[in-house]
């Protein structure tokens, strides 16, 4: 079992990261709430990890904080919620925002997550009630992902690809990014992703 990785951040292609640990590259899937807090490429990073093993694959998931990993593990114990859906949930909602959804019985926010229907949202609220402690801060307080210093870059395309990888339909991802780009025309891909995901967070 791989519980933690400490190494050099070699690549970011949301939601996938490549972490170089003494010459060995580990592919890690991370929620956007973690990706927004990563250092610049080439910087040192430490991730708390969870290894998900199925009949067809082995996937490593990484989180900046152990509390985020614990929340991920709590989510995947809910019937009908797999690692991919949990990753999508934690990309749009941090722990504090998710706790508010549960406390307020806010099904409307949860059903905006790809793959989460009304029944799954209701099940999440029931099974998470009493397990989450509201914390200070929300998605808007999370620092932006470091820019990669590339002069010519399709920020909108990168943002759409990241949202699609999280499970959003391409047409929906395009609309979300278009709205974000209209709000901040000069935004980089990280900002576009953050703005698109922030639209689902509870007020």
Image (cartoon, helix red, strand yellow):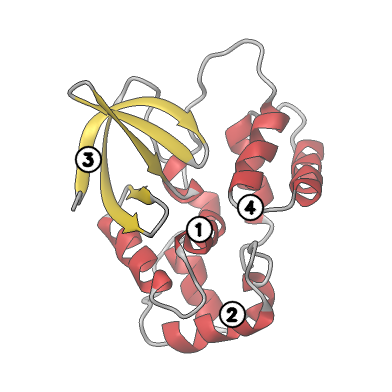
Name of the residue lying farthest toward the top: 151
Q: Earlier in the sequence, mark 4 or mark 1?
A: 1
Residue 120 is marked as 2
Residue 197 is marked as 4
CA gap, disc 3 to disc 2?
32 Å
Q: Earlier in the sequence, mark 2 or mark 4?
A: 2
Percent x, y of residue 43: 31, 24
CA gap, disc 4 to disc 1?
16 Å
Label 1 crowd bin: few (<14), some (14–19), many (20+), radius 10 Å: some
Residue labelled with disc 3? 5
CA gap, disc 2 to disc 1?
14 Å
The residue closer to the viewer here, 165 or 192, is 165
Percent x, y of residue 160: 69, 39
Provide the secondary structure element on which disc 2 rests: helix
The residue closer to the viewer here, 125 or 22, is 22
Asked if one can make out residue 100 in the rendered structure from this viewpoint, the answer is yes
CA gap, disc 1 to disc 3?
20 Å
Residue at horizontal 74 percent and vertical 47 percent from the top? 173
Label 3 crowd bin: few (<14), some (14–19), many (20+), radius 10 Å: some
Provide the secondary structure element on which disc 1 rests: helix
CA gap, disc 3 to disc 4?
27 Å
Q: Which of marks 3 and 2 is nearer the N terminus?
A: 3
Tell me whether circle 4 and circle 1 mark residues in contact (CB < 8 Å). no
Question: Where's the C terminus, which quadrant?
Answer: bottom right
Residue at horizontal 34 percent and vertical 67 percent from the top? 73
Percent x, y of residue 174: 78, 43
Q: Is residue 55 left or right of residue 167?
A: left
């Amino acid at each position: 079992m791989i519980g933690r990785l400490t190494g050099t951040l070699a690549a970011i292609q949301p939601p996938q990261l490549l972490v170089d640990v003494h010459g060995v590259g580990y592919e890690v899937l991370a929620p956007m709430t973690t990706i927004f807090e990563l250092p610049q490429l080439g910087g040192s990073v430490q991730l708390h990890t969870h290894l998900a093993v199925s009949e067809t694959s082995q996937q490593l998931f990484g989180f900046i904080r152990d509390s985020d990993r614990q929340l991920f593990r709590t989510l995947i114990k809910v019937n009908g919620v797999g690692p991919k859906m949990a990753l999508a949930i934690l990309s749009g909602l941090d722990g504090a925002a998710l706790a508010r959804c549960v406390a307020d019985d806010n099904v409307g926010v949860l059903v905006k997550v790809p793959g989460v229907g009304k029944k799954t949202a209701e099940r999440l609220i029931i099974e998470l009630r009493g397990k989450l402690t509201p914390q200070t801060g929300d998605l808007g307080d999370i620092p932006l992902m470091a820019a990669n210093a590339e002069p010519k870059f399709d920020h909108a395309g990168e943002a759409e690809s990241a949202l699609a990888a999280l499970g959003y339909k391409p047409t929906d991802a395009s609309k979300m990014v278009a709205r974000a780009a209209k709000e901040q025309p000069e935004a980089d891909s990280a900002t576009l992703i953050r703005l698109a995901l922030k639209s689902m967070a509870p007020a």
